[in-house]
Image (cartoon, rainbow, N blue to C red):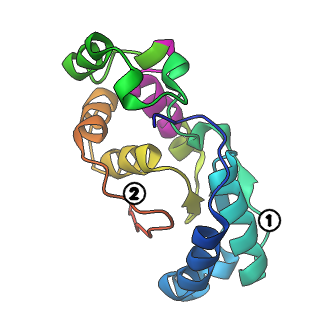
């Protein structure tokens, strides 16, 4: 199923498992660290519950952390998307707008704009595509286009509620 910006619920069992495991994986001083989240429910619900469990300030939703918008592809089975369209995206991962939605470069620009406004340490609860972009953007001197290509070329291996610590 292709979903990016679709606002799907998270499985309640997965949410509870994440809440049980996450606090032990976070830095000791995480309670005082601001929490930013994608406004999409699968992230926002986790961020809100985690903040409550940690007795931290409520999370700040930021649309720039949302997953990529796949336009007309949203909600379709991958097998139902015409092969020629998938191939067109594979031929130009950075500039092609799947389903008429966003390009990876556009997503990289909004994620980079979010980073430009982060002044200190932050916890960010977002999506696999956004995490791959944050990881790519953490490399010193990388261009926006190179970061977009790196993120788009990286296989999806990020589990729900996985912890990634990045240094900028």
Whole-percent x, y for residue 124 in the image:
56, 59
| Count of numbered circles in the view | 2
Determine which quarter of the picture holds residue 47.
Answer: bottom right
Kind of element beneath mark 1: loop
Q: Quadrant of the N terminus?
A: top left
Q: Is residue 9 a member of the stretch shown in magenta?
A: no
- Which marked residue is nearer to the observer: mark 2 or mark 1? 1
Residue at point 41% right, 68% down? 165
Task: State the mark number for residue 122.
Answer: none
Closer to the camera, 48 or 74?
74
Residue at left 78%, top 82%?
Answer: 55
**Percent from the top left, x then y, of residue 137?**
35, 45
Q: Residue 146 at x, y = what percent?
A: 25, 32
Q: Is residue 72 left or right of residue 98?
A: right
State yes or no: residue 102 in magenta: yes
Would you place residue 127 above or below residue 85 in this image? Answer: below
User: Residue 98, position in %: x, y?
Assistant: 41, 18
Disc 2, SS? loop
Main secondary structure type of the part rendered in magenta: helix
The residue drawn where x is 51% and y is 83% is 27
Q: CA distance from mark 2 to mark 1?
A: 24 Å
- In the drawing, what numbered circle is on residue 58? 1
Q: Residue at x 42, y 51 (%)?
A: 131
Q: Is residue 54 above or below residue 110?
A: below
Magenta segment boundaries in residue numbering: 100-112
Q: Which mark is residue 168?
A: 2
């Amino acid at each position: 199923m292709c979903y990016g910006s679709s606002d799907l619920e998270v499985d309640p069992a997965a949410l509870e498992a994440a809440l049980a495991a996450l606090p032990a994986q976070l830095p000791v001083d995480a309670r005082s660290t601001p929490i930013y989240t994608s406004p999409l429910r699968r992230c926002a619900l986790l961020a809100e519950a985690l903040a409550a469990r940690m007795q931290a300030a409520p999370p700040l939703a930021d649309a720039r952390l949302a997953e990529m918008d796949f336009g007309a592809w949203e909600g379709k089975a991958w097998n139902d998307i015409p092969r020629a369209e998938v191939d067109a995206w594979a031929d130009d991962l950075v500039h092609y707008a799947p389903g008429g939605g966003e390009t990876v470069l556009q997503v990289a620009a909004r994620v980079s704009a979010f980073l430009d406004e982060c002044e200190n340490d932050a916890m960010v609860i977002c999506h696999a595509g956004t995490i791959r972009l944050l990881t790519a953007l953490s490399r010193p001197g990388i261009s926006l286009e190179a970061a977009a290509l790196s993120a788009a070329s990286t296989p999806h291996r990020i589990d729900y509620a996985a912890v990634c610590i990045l240094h900028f």
